[in-house]
């Protein structure tokens, strides 16, 4: 039995660290990752290189001394974004990628793109400069059922966009469907996808069966079991197109536990232990490192991290807090619903 594994230090290619007191509370929980793509959906959003650089400074201040984390900043694409600003921020090393939120698709996405024709020149400049576009892949059309919004986005928005701009490097963030998996598999070298930890663990029953459980509500919302199985196959199958983006998205319990609660699962504290459990379940421990530490770096054309972390399997479950404190409030940590015996070694 394997009871200790080492991995090149993992990267998190999709992470929400927020700002202010929340940033201070959650940043230490991601400090052990190598690189992390930092989502720009603050209020107001991060739309300029100057803002991204200032946000990066605030993140560095929030990290504990000796943290491994190197924040990889992103800009939030709006209808008004100028191509020259993106290219300058990218060439200047300020940003790693640009994030596309269809306006209204998810938390703090009101400033997102409403008119894809208007951003077309920006996408072309990004393709030319080699800037990756990270896509929140859901349509916002109220007529489309929420469980279909990813599949419809692929047909209506993403595929036409990629046909217009085939050289653009695109990461479909947090895919949740077998359609997403199939599209990425068929997509050529410029397309990849992140998969979250929680979408490998829960299906929509976790949110809705036997009572409503807001801590499992995130966007894109977890789908039916067949989709979870497709995601597990993609994540654990050793294909280079799929890599970890936790989408750890903290909200205060007060904001989650509302008649209209926020979307997001906070998985940063226990993500690596849960993932190791999932990969062991699938008989794929030897493929965990590809998913957490190699595939994403390769897509972003970066070398993998040189240093390593270890996880040890013990007889007693790893203990994680059910909640953490954040500025006088609490944030609930994702509960996978089963004991996890893989402990991160210090
Ligand atoms: C994210 C957030 O809270 O910022 N929420 C979520 O449910 N994943 C936004 C996002 O990535 O969609
Ligand atoms: Zn996210």
Image: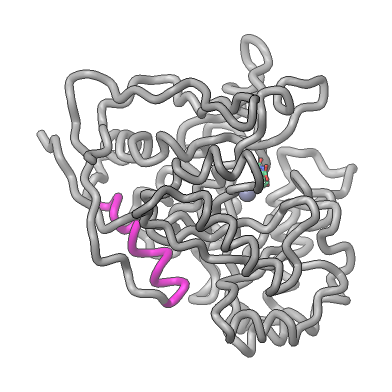
Q: In the image, what residue occupies the spot 71% across and 38% down?
A: 147
Is 298 in the magenta? Answer: yes
324 w.r.t. 123: above or below: above
Q: For residue 80, which quarter of the picture?
A: bottom right
Q: In the image, what residue occupies the spot 30% across and 65% down?
A: 305
Q: Nearer the viewer, residue 145 or 7?
A: 7
Measured as percent of width and height from the top left, residue 190 is found at 54, 76
- Please report the bounds of the magenta region as a residue range: 287-301
Measured as percent of width and height from the top left, residue 277 is found at 31, 34
Measured as percent of width and height from the top left, residue 118 is found at 88, 76
Q: In the image, what residue occupies the spot 63% across and 39% down?
A: 21
Q: Quadrant of the C terminus?
A: top left
Q: Nearer the viewer, residue 241 or 59?
A: 59
Dominant secondary structure of the residues highlighted in magenta in the image: helix
Number of numbered discs: 0
Residue 78 in the figure: left or right of residue 271: right
Is 79 in the magenta? Answer: no
Residue 61 in the figure: left or right of residue 123: left
Q: Nearer the viewer, residue 260 or 307?
A: 307
């Amino acid at each position: 039995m394997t009871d200790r594994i080492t991995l090149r230090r993992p990267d998190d290619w999709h992470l929400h660290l927020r700002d202010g007191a929340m940033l201070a509370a959650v940043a230490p929980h991601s400090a052990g990752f190598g690189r992390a793509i930092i989502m720009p959906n603050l209020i107001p959003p991060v739309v300029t290189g100057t803002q991204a650089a200032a946000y990066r400074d605030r993140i560095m201040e929030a990290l504990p001394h000796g943290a491994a984390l190197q924040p990889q900043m992103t800009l939030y694409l709006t209808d008004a974004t100028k191509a020259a600003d993106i290219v300058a921020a990218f060439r200047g090393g300020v940003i790693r990628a640009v994030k596309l939120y269809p306006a209204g698709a998810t938390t703090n996405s009101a400033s997102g793109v409403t008119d894809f024709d208007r951003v077309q020149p920006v996408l072309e400049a990004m393709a030319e400069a080699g800037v990756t576009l990270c896509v929140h892949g859901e349509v916002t059309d109220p007529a489309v059922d929420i469980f279909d919004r990813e599949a419809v986005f692929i047909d209506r928005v993403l595929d036409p966009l990629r046909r217009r701009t085939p050289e653009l490097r695109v990461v479909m963030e947090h895919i949740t469907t077998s359609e997403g998996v199939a599209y990425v598999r068929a997509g050529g070298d410029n397309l990849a996808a992140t998969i979250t930890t929680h979408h490998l663990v829960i299906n929509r029953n976790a949110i809705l069966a036997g009572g409503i459980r807001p801590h499992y509500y995130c966007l894109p919302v977890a789908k039916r079991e067949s989709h979870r199985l497709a995601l597990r196959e993609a994540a654990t199958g050793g294909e280079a197109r799929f890599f970890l983006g936790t989408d750890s998205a903290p909200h205060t319990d007060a904001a989650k536990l509302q008649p209209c609660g926020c979307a997001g699962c906070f998985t940063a504290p226990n993500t690596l232990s849960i993932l190791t459990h999932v990969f062991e379940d699938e008989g794929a421990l030897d493929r965990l490192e590809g998913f957490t530490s190699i595939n994403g770096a390769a897509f972003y054309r970066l070398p993998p991290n040189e240093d390593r972390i270890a996880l040890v399997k013990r007889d007693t479950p790893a203990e994680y807090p059910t909640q953490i404190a954040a500025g006088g409030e609490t944030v609930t940590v994702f509960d996978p619903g089963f004991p996890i015996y893989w402990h991160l070694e210090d």
